[in-house]
Image (spheres, rainbow, N blue to C red):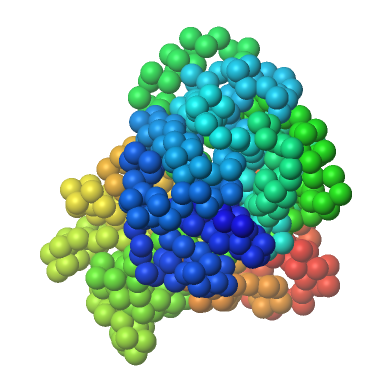
Amino acid sequence: MTYFVTGATGFIGRRLVKELLQKRGTVYFLVRKKDPKVLSALYEYWGVDKKRAVAIKGDLGKKRLGIGKKDFETLRGKVRHFYHLAALYDITATAEALEQVNVEGTRQAVQLAGEIKAKCFHLVSSIAAAGLYNGVFREDMFAEATGLSKSPYHRTKHESEGVVRHECPIPWRVYRPGVVVGDSRTGEMDKIDGPYYFFKTIQKTRALLPPWFPTIGIEGGRINLVPVDFIVDAITHISHKKGLDGKCFHLTDPDPKRIGDVLNIFAKAGHAPAMAMRVNARMFGIVPKYVWQGLWALTPVRRMVYSLLSNFDLPLETFKFVNYPTDFDCRETTKALKGSGISVPPIESYADRLWDYWERHLDPDLHIDRSLSGRVEGKVVMVTGASSGIGKATAIKMGEGGAIVVMVARSLDKLEEARDEVVQHGGNAHIYTCDISDLEDCDRLVEKVLADHGQVDILVNNAGRSIRRGIANSMDRFHDFERTMQLNYFGALRLIMGLLPSMMENRTGHVINISSIGVLSNAPRFSAYVASKAALDAFTRCAASELSHAGLHFTTINMPLVRTPMIAPTKLYNNVPTKSPEEAADMVVDAIVHRPKRIATRLGISAEIAHLLLPKMTELGMNEAFQLFGDSAAAQGKSEKAGQTSPEQIAIAQLTRGIHW
């Protein structure tokens, strides 16, 4: 048996060709150009040579698909089944492009099929041909489609089907697949489309919250998902069955799920929190249309919406179909497939395969150069507190990434030792002494660094002072609050303010502030330290709001407990889990590579949400922990050694890993 296929190089097309070849037939397929690499890959996938699968050069935009006279004569009178799959399946494409490919391309395919005297024309259409019909759309319905003017994609899919129905000179069959997803057996997919648009949102939610944390999401209409292997098997079976000419077949799920249910299924597959509460998108319909139009006319509103959607890789067009109103009857298809063993598998049975394939092959982050060297190579990175701990570990990593590392600390001797380590790891380091708590010294540092290097591309405000002392033991120690504020807030702020003018002039720059998990958890005994870090956090949020248009980025890292010299005086921390300086430096690397607004542990975020939703209960829990962990002997002004850490203290510290107690 001889076949002709357009769109044979596409996701559905190449699989359909493989099935047709297994029937021991010959397949002629349309290509725009005979690229040897493309053809070689196709032949390898199909497992045949060019005698069984014959490439025909042509073009959808040309008359009779642009097929040459010799190929036309070869095809005439030989083709039993003509499959037309070539189309533009993209809701974001322009109306002109969709018209040219979907409508005119189909018209030329129909004319060619008639002229070569093919026996049957098979159009792979789409459920989009129904437009936005409100209700059940049967397989024998066509002219009843509504809402076509609202979407060029839906309109052109409808019109292309109309071309087949009204202009095709030979018997025809139409197939309307639902939203095609990857292979239910392997998860393989070739592009981001349909529900895949929401995978990045699910992934980012997983990174922020533990799987058990309930979230609020959206509910909408039913979304009809079908795996590509079902589509191919169904088309192959139905197209070879006799007595079905002139009919349309809905290749859809007879029991489709609502969008909220589908998102929760994929959230489970991606180990992300499920939406415990879903808000029906139809509720937004009570807002008058003119109000939405008025809001959308405001440039700041559009800019915020586009920025938010861009962050989650969501096209705006996706939300036009959240309340998709159409249900698809598929009784003719079910009847035609009876006894074949071909049916739509439930999405729950293969969602994990789709997710795994997307995360391994289609995740947009995989195809962007977001390596550390890609961000910092040849850039000037200033790290304060660089002589030890987090600062030194960060400087080493920056040096390994190819940065020009500006290392800042008070002690010249320790700085020199730290610089030598950076150099040993292949880094390019320059050292500058400065007491960050001295504002005049900060000004001197900024002036010197700019004179030597011209600019600072990335500032890592790491230098800081921590004091662990309860308020009751701080009544006569007001200077504790002054000195933490002077270094952690005013000193860091002085550096930021000194470097911002050159960053704004260059329209590039990144400020990373090492804050504390205590700002999120409101850790007792750290009121002086947390207040100073919270002040810097607040300034950073305001600065980001003012300067995001200028190409500047600000990131706050709410660092959990790290094993550094700063925590050494508190003997309790010898028996509780802490991060190493190298692990903390990895968080700085993550900040530089991805430029998020904030980096925090799941425990830190959960603590902040708990304080927001259950403030009194959380306060009582923190107070219990406060009473369990006493002030150190030094904090109480005593010289004797502190007592041993109790099992209860160790247990609580283990459960709240990273929180400062």
Indicate the position of residue 10 as horizontal and vertical percent values: 50, 53
4 and 158: which is toward the camera: 4
Indicate the position of residue 580 as horizontal and vertical percent values: 56, 76
What residue is shown at x 81% (from left), y 72% (from top)?
646
What residue is shown at x 38% (from left), y 41% (from top)?
64
What residue is shown at x 75% (from left), y 68% (from top)?
654
Q: Is residue 242 left or right of residue 11?
A: right
Task: Please determine whether, in this image, residue 12 is positioned above or below residue 400.
Answer: above
What residue is shown at x 34% (from left), y 46% (from top)?
66
535 and 402: which is toward the camera: 402
Quadrant housing residue 335: top right
Quadrant housing residue 391: bottom left
Q: Is residue 648 left or right of residue 120?
A: right
Viewer can see residue 593: no
Viewer can see residue 585: yes
Indicate the position of residue 317 as horizontal and vertical percent values: 50, 32
Query: Looking at the figure, which quarter contains the C terminus?
Result: bottom right
Query: Looking at the figure, which quarter contains the N terminus?
Result: bottom right
Task: Please determine whether, in this image, residue 287 is positioned above or below residue 429.
Answer: above
Indicate the position of residue 453 as horizontal and vertical percent values: 17, 67
Q: Residue furthest bottom?
A: 424
